[in-house]
Amino acid sequence: MLIDSHCHLDCLDLTPFGGDFDRMMEATREAGVGHLLCVSIDLERYPAMVQRVAHRPEVSISVGVHPNDRERHEPEPEELVALAADPRNVAIGETGLDYFRNTGDMAWQQQRFRRHIRAARTCGKPLIIHTRAAAEDTLQIMAEEGADQIGGVMHCFTEGWEVAAAALEMGFYISFSGIITFNSAKELRQTAARIPADRLLIETDAPYLAPVPHRGKSNLPGYVGYVADCLAEVRGVSRQQLATQTSDNYQRLFGTLG
């Protein structure tokens, strides 16, 4: 069984399935994906996201506000903790820092990130961390706020070994997306080969970052198999071994499956 440890089911393009969410989920199951984590990016759409997957026991959820958009509702830690009490909720995030699309004073992003870490420590649920063009500050804030006390995952990892090693030292898992299949990702594949087997996760980040051979198109959770195949080749193991290991890792981090 494959587990897509990070996707956005409320954002998918369902046109290939006639707009039918259940048809898409059936295709995902037929692709060998047995469980999915639907990750929150803002609280305005959070109720609709929860409703979208309410009838799907094979889907877990998280709660958080993505770092990109400054105009989003800024939750206090107490609000995140209250929402995370939902028994389907397994994590706080996604959260983190993204300096690629933002310029100027990033204090607002940093404070948002700190609130999420504090919420995670309070409710005892792991963090889902996004970092882009901000690795140094991301690691610094993680250390200052005690993220190592709760752990989590560095999602859609694209950094080098030094950043991976620092996150691993804080008890975090490393998750790879379709980016690892890109021709330009040679160094990333070298980093992926060095990650301890018991700290490895796979994801799609669907509908974003579709893997080769679907690069440039809308991504789907069923495509996580391409990530698994690439990672298995890089690490010199079978797809079945990779699937079993990453599924075990997911359950160790986020809890037993529904």
Image: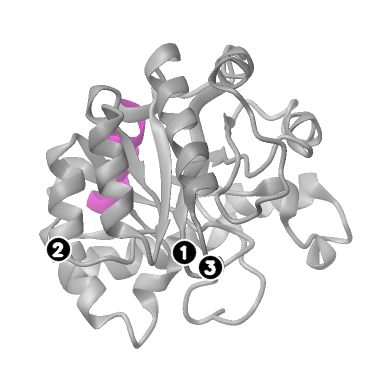
Q: Of the residues under marks 3 and 2, which one precedes in the sequence?
A: 3
- Amino acid at circle 3: Thr
Q: Nearer the viewer, residue 24 or 144?
A: 144
Task: Identify residue type, mark 2.
Answer: Trp
Any part of residue 1 in sight:
no
Mark 1 surroundings: few (<14), some (14-19) or many (≥20) residues within 10 A: some
Picture quadrant where residue 170 is located: top left
Task: Name the secondary structure under disc 1.
Answer: loop
Does 222 sit left or right of 182 as displayed? Answer: right
Q: Which residue is mark 2?
A: 161
Give the CA separation, mark 3 to mark 2: 26 Å
Quarter assignment of residue 61: top right
Q: Badges 3 and 1: C-beta atoms under 8 Å apart?
A: yes
Label 3 residue SS:
loop
Image coordinates of residue 221 in percent, x first then y, are 57, 55
**Residue at image mark 3:** 103
Give, as a single range, the part of the protein colored magenta: 240-252
Which residue type carries mark 1?
Tyr
Q: Which residue was labeled with disc 1?
A: 99
Find residue 116 and report its horizontal and vertical position in percent.
48, 30
Q: Nearer the viewer, mark 3 or mark 2?
A: 3
Q: Is residue 184 left or right of residue 97?
A: left
Q: Secondary structure at mark 2?
A: helix
As drawn, 174 above or below 178: above
Q: Position of residue 164 (x, y in %)?
A: 19, 55
Q: Decide which of 74, 122 is in the foreground and name it.
A: 74
- Labels 1 and 2: the sequence-earlier one: 1
